Image (tube, rainbow, N blue to C red):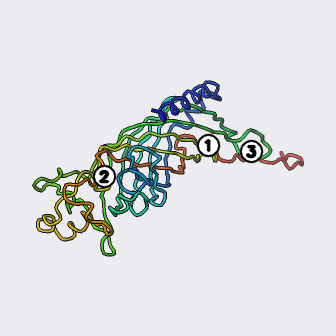
Amino acid sequence: MRYFLIFCLALSTLVSWSQSSNFNSAKNWKMNRKEFILQAGATQFLGDLGGRDQIGTDYSLVDIDFPSTSLNVGVGYRMRFAPHFATTTLLNVGLLRGSDAETGDPDRNARNLAFRAPVVNLNQRLEWLIFVNEKYGKRYNMKGMKGFGEHHDQVYLFAGIGLAYFNPQAPYKGGWENLRPLKTEGQGLEGGAKVYLPFTATIPIGIGYRRALSGMWRIGIEATYVKTFSDYIDDVHGFYYDPAILEAEVSATSAALSNPSVTHPEWFNPGSKRGEPEKDAYFYLNITFYKNLTYKPMRKMYVPRYKGGRAKF
């Protein structure tokens, strides 16, 4: 609740600021309606594995685990359909990671679970431009012609819906094993967990800022929190399953990865808690580039020079 109140206070401040924002003319935003997007940056997993030296908090940014930061890239298309609103289609590919070895919490550290998960996320979002200040400079690049340069600043909030594919993997004997086929919590076996799908709906929400590099290019920074509806992005959800049954019904690899504890494997017997039931989330912090597909500056105009002399008839 405290974070929600802080967010509402910040939002009300920004809205008040936006009331005095400078829309140079109705024409300017229409010159920047369609854009191609390219972005890259850091990812951070918010789930059962890794995190601070305490019990994990899936929904909270206070559980950020900096040693498990990874990378993502994205491409997209943005269409601004009103002075204050735009819609963006974005395809993002990234890697999420987490490891109990990175936390000082004794129980989680002894659990010794670790994972990585390639994630492909397609989402559609609505952007609300809460502050806009934009001007377009002279279109004709004529020698000696003076005019103001391109000026473009935006602060925006966004939210949307999406669909993500994920593939959790664990380190094993120098390589990486796909975890979903290994049924580490007895998925589909008698008394085990339900089989989970490698897809989940997502809700991305966030804030961004961008400004002009030229009439054709923009650069910005964007922070995105992605809520998911799956607790299996890290393959950890419920309770430990009997490793003897896993070895007999699935494989020895499944039994080994279901409980990889080295220091205290006896703490994690069949039926004991393996993870928390809260849904997973993740976070992006990206540098974003935009190419304007609407506005095209005129080419340099040729103005012939008068060299003097008499005209010939």
Amino acid on which disc 1 is placed: Arg
Foreground tag (3 vs 2): 2
Quadrant (top left/top right/bottom left/bottom right) for the N terminus: top left
Pick out the residue farthest to the right: 309
Amino acid on which disc 2 is placed: Tyr
Dot 1 surroundings within 10 Å: few (below 14), some, or many (20 or more)? many
Whole-percent x, y for residue 164 in the image: 33, 49
The dot on residue 142 is: 3
Instruction: Judge whether 52 appears above or below 132 on screen.
Output: below
In this view of the protein, can residue 51 be seen by the observer?
Answer: yes
- Rounded to the nearest angstrom, the CA distance separating label 1 from label 3 is 25 Å
Q: Secondary structure at mark 3?
A: loop
Q: Secondary structure at mark 1?
A: strand
Dot 3 surroundings within 10 Å: few (below 14), some, or many (20 or more)? few
Instruction: Judge whether 141 appears above or below 183 on screen.
Output: above
40 to the left or right of 305: left
Residue at x 53%, y 49% (from the top left corner): 288
Amino acid on which disc 3 is placed: Met
Which tag, 2 or 1, sits closer to the chain's start? 2
Residue at x 44%, y 56% (from the top left corner): 72
Which tag, 3 or 2, sits closer to the chain's start? 3
- Rounded to the nearest angstrom, the CA distance separating label 2 from label 1 is 32 Å
Q: Nearer the viewer, residue 49 or 294?
A: 49
Q: Which residue bears the numbered disc 1?
A: 211
302 to the left or right of 134: right
Q: Which residue bears the numbered disc 2?
A: 165
